[in-house]
Image (cartoon, rainbow, N blue to C red):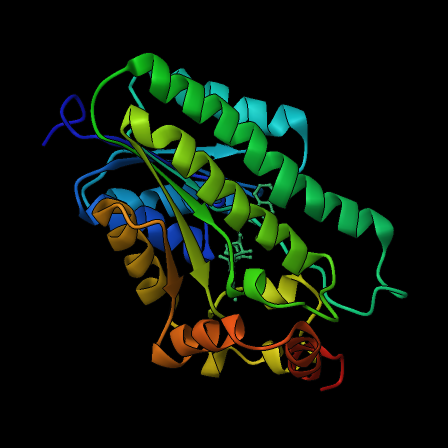
Amino acid sequence: MDTSTRPLALVSGGSSGIGHELAAELARRGYDVAISGSSERVFEAADRLRELGAEAYPHQADLATYEGVEGFWSFVAGLGRPVNVACLNVGIGVGGAFADTDLDDELRMIAINCAGTVHLAKRVVRAMLADGAGDRRILVVSSTSATTPTPYEPVYGPTKAFGFSFAESIREELREHGIVVTALLPGATDSDFHANAGMGDTVFGDNSWKNDRTEVARQGIEALLAGDDHVVGGDAATKQQVVDNRATSEPEKARRQGELARPGG
Ligand SMILES: NC(=O)c1ccc[n+]([C@@H]2O[C@H](COP(=O)([O-])OP(=O)(O)OC[C@H]3O[C@@H](n4cnc5c(N)ncnc54)[C@H](OP(=O)(O)O)[C@@H]3O)[C@@H](O)[C@H]2O)c1
């Protein structure tokens, strides 16, 4: 396929971690990909995606800001091609007890995980509706943290619950327009995420026991293309955890989660 016939996907936070694997999975399935990242490594990430046969369009921007999100969208819209798949993936964490964490860090996280997701979704949805035709799909990357209180990441979990509920809500609205919306809820996954969240001295500091990010991304794209409302990304134990969470009280889940995320744990 050449670029005129290949469908186009965008992936926010596509330069590393789960987002890069989402972009790679889409590239392998015949999509060209526009990716964003906060650092210059987004350009190397695009080179890796080209090796998979895709045309890749990298854009460096801080998606914690209105201008950054708008800039990424303008960059994608400027390609002059309809967006077939949008993966609203970018997200950060902030670990630590609420009494100790920095307010600015948490407000920045809310800006990226919540405001930025809504902002990019608004541009994507309006563009998809204006295009009027074709296969259109949106993947919102939430977390299994959406299904439990998250002590020692007390604002992160709520931002992911926001994403899950938002995805399920717009899914219902967009159904009659033929646009599929799917939420991906990864369990703990091997990436830079917990180190970047300042959680290196918790159970989450060790990547060796976590889910494989390639497999998590594959499950996310499969669910998106199948039209599922959501999928838990990870191994059987991760999926069972979410089933169990539905039947477990909030205080009990909070106690269990707190043991895992407590600094020095
Ligand atoms: N890893 C987990 O255990 C886990 C579990 C459940 C859900 N999730 C969710 O999965 C998503 C991806 O997480 P991940 O594990 O792949 O994290 P990651 O490895 O830390 O990757 C984060 C990506 O986001 C980009 N990014 C970070 N801050 C940014 C900013 N201000 N502006 C623009 N781009 C920014 C990074 O760009 P640079 O590379 O240029 O910095 C990178 O591409 C997040 O929404 C997260 O909440 C992760």
Can you give x and y, in whole percent of width and height, for residue 110 in the image?
70, 45
Judging depth in this view, the residue of 8 and 229 nearest the camera is: 229
Q: Which residue lies furthest to the left in this view?
A: 1
Can residue 61 be seen from the camera position used here? no
Q: Residue at position x 83%, y 47% from top?
A: 104
Q: Quadrant of residue 196?
A: bottom right
Q: Which residue lies furthest to the right in this view?
A: 99
Judging depth in this view, the residue of 121 and 26 nearest the camera is: 121
Can you give x and y, in whole percent of width and height, for residue 249 in the image?
63, 76
Can residue 263 be seen from the camera position used here? yes
Q: In which quarter of the image is the N terminus?
A: top left
Can you give x and y, in whole percent of width and height, for residue 172 in the image?
40, 36
Q: Is residue 107 left or right of residue 51?
A: right
Q: In this view, does 163 lie to the left or right of 47?
A: right
Q: Residue at position x 75%, y 70% from top?
A: 152
Vertical arrangement, residue 224 with respect to residue 120, above or below: below
Vertical arrangement, residue 178 with respect to residue 147, above or below: above
Q: Residue at position x 22%, y 37% from top?
A: 31
Q: In which quarter of the image is the C terminus?
A: bottom right
